[in-house]
Amino acid sequence: MRKKIVAGNWKMNTLLKDGMELAQAVEKLTSEKSNQALVIIAPPFTHLSKVRELIDHVKLSAQNCASEASGAYTGEVSPEMLVSAGAEYVILGHSERRSYYKEENELLNKKVKLALSKRLKPIYCCGEVLEERESGRLFDVVRAQLEVGLKDLSEQEIDQVVIAYEPVWAIGTGVVASPDQAQEMHKFIRDLLGELFSKQVAEHMSILYGGSCKPSNAEELFANPDVDGGLIGGASLVAEDFMAIVNAF
Ligand code: 13P
């Protein structure tokens, strides 16, 4: 059985106090119910170690990490620092990092490998922009993101990775992918993993959907055979909404 996962990407939201309250609320709701899905939250860097003290049933993720292990890289945060603050996962390749900070597949491959070498599990994001979908290039774009971003990983390493498909046109827009659109791309990703790694890796991979996922649409998205959960932005900032998505399983 593949792991079902619902992860909340808080992005650059919440001050420390609000973030701590939100984490506490998510922890409480998670602990009260036996969930089908693993619950992960990804607060800003500044909140990680405080939030770690407040959670037990919920796993902790960072939203980014450096591509270098240590040294003179002002402003960067290394995977090892994140682990020392209590993080178990790191989101890499989010479309906002790709577009605003020009992070490309080669750099992301370096980050993925470094994170894995420090026992930090990447939640590796991929997805096309609207123009790429409309011109029919969506599968080529996602293929390159996975082929290059996950290049040269051993089977043991790829087994620690979670993939999130986030069509960029659906992020923060209120326009969610249809269940069929999500399933079509998730199946493509799973088949591609079979080609790049092995059938076993493909079968074992949790592939999350992200982009305007809400309590009202989570159930029909998660009902698809190749959709193993969600990476949630806006709705993860309200504990009840986030947990309603977790409970959609
Ligand atoms: P929204 O859920 O706000 O559309 O954001 C999705 C996302 O980017 C999660 O990483």
Image (cartoon, rainbow, N blue to C red):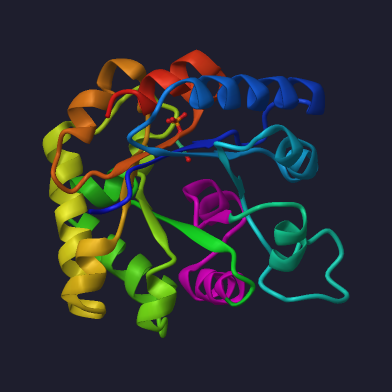
Relative to 188, 120 lies left or right = right
Range drawn in magenta? 89-116
The structure residue drawn at horizontal position 74% and vertical position 26%, both measured from the top left corner, is 20
Task: Pinpoint residue 180: horizontal percent, then vertical percent.
Answer: 11, 37
Relative to 30, 146 lies left or right = left
Relative to 37, 114 lies left or right = right
Q: Quadrant of the C terminus?
A: top left
The structure residue drawn at horizontal position 70% and vertical position 60%, both measured from the top left corner, is 83
Task: Pinpoint residue 3: horizontal percent, then vertical percent.
Answer: 32, 50
| 218 over 76 or under it: above or below | above
Task: Pinpoint residue 29: horizontal percent, then vertical percent.
Answer: 52, 20
Asked if the magenta segment contains residue 113, the reply would be yes
* Ligand 1 image-quadrant field: top left
Asked if the magenta segment contains residue 224, the reply would be no
Relative to 140, 206 lies left or right = right
Q: Quadrant of residue 173?
A: top left
